Amino acid sequence: MKMNESCKAIACFWLMSFFILSVAEPTRPQLTTDFYRTSCPDLWTIVRTEVLNAMNEEIRIAASLLRLHFHDCFVNGCDGSILLDGDQDSEKFATPNLNSVRGFEVIDRIKTSLEHSCSGVVSCADILAIAARDSVFLSGGPFWYVQQGRRDGFVSNKTLANLAIPSPFDTLDTIISKFDNVGLNVKDVVTLSGAHTIGRARCTFFSNRLFNFSGTEEPDNTLEYEMLSELQNLCPQDGDGNTTTVLDQNSIDQFDNNYFKNLLNGKGLLSSDQILFSSDDETTSTTKQLVTSYSENERYFFMEFAYAMIKMGNINPLIGSEGEIRKNCRVINS
């Protein structure tokens, strides 16, 4: 056989091998923005209506639904595992979630309506992602096209939730590490923290800053004086820690960039908020620049927030034949 014929034979062999492998190993399914276009065309209207009804009953539920999606995605990926009822080992009993996450009844109502319209089609994980988007948009924030096609997981992992979900008491390095563990970067830390422009927090999550911060027997010196005085009255040292206040003192329940303006003025409520601007950590040079940029340009913040939410919603989703489509978001199918 001549040299050029040999080369042609080898080329044909590799081409045929590539073709066989391509057929044998089909491309992994991907999330898409039109996944339910024909299988459940009323999906968007149903979710939007139920979220709006819930917000009319209680405006703060928007922040709660957004937080549900966030806490779900950080544990096992975005698989609806936070919605599962169960014993003390379920995620609902993890420290970051116990007596803290809420909005489960709203997800139940959405699921019930969807089961009447298109039974067994829409996953609970996708409901969380869409409800989070609508909560932001209906609060005055950005709109983005939610990618869909997630399926629901079988396992709710309390131990992982305790380890993976960022805490208001974490250092900046720890928060960054927890984000990195799920494929999110420093910019995502700052951008997604902007969700705290809506919502509330109990005294127990920030009272450590008010009287004896880090064992100094003094308040946190990064906390603005007048706000400190107000919070000390709201959350006395002998209180039960359950009194709540808004995370964003300047624009209650409105999704905007005032959260970042607050940080510039020492008015971040949680320690994990204020350290984005005031920490001595080396990384703060990056986070501080982002805080400043977002405080000056709301449109820029909105654009980056939408992108970060899409990115977060793509954390290890179950797709294709993985997982299941739950009939009831609180329990796996029998």
Image (cartoon, rainbow, N blue to C red):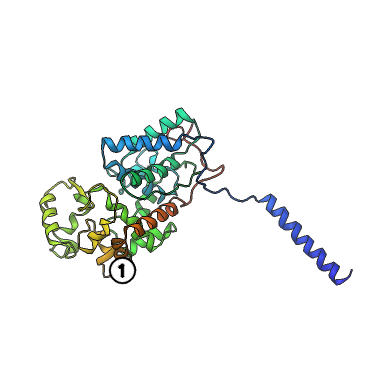
Number of dots carrying numbers: 1
Q: Is residue 210 left or right of residue 49?
A: left
- Residue 229: x %, y % from top left: 10, 57
- Residue 323: x %, y % from top left: 51, 41
Residue 17 versus residue 291: which sits nearer the camera?
291
- Residue 250: x %, y % from top left: 20, 53
Residue 212 versus residue 21: which sits nearer the camera?
21
- Say which quarter of the image contains residue 308: bottom left
Residue at position x 36%, y 59% in the image: 300
Q: Can residue 329 be seen?
A: no
Residue occupying the far top of the picture? 116
Q: Is residue 185 left or right of residue 210?
A: right
Q: Can residue 250 be seen?
A: yes
Q: Relative to 184, does residue 127 appear above or below in the rendering?
A: above
Residue at position x 41%, y 45% in the image: 129
Residue behind mark 1? 284
* Quadrant for the N terminus in the image: bottom right
Q: Relative to 176, does residue 26 appear above or below in the rendering?
A: above
Q: Secondary structure at mark 1?
A: helix
Q: Residues within 10 Å of mark 1 (few under 14, many from 20)?
A: some
Residue occupying the far right of the picture? 1
Q: Is residue 319 left or right of residue 94?
A: right
Residue 5 versus residue 217: which sits nearer the camera?
5
Please name the amino acid that badge 1 sits on: Thr
- Residue 218: x %, y % from top left: 13, 63
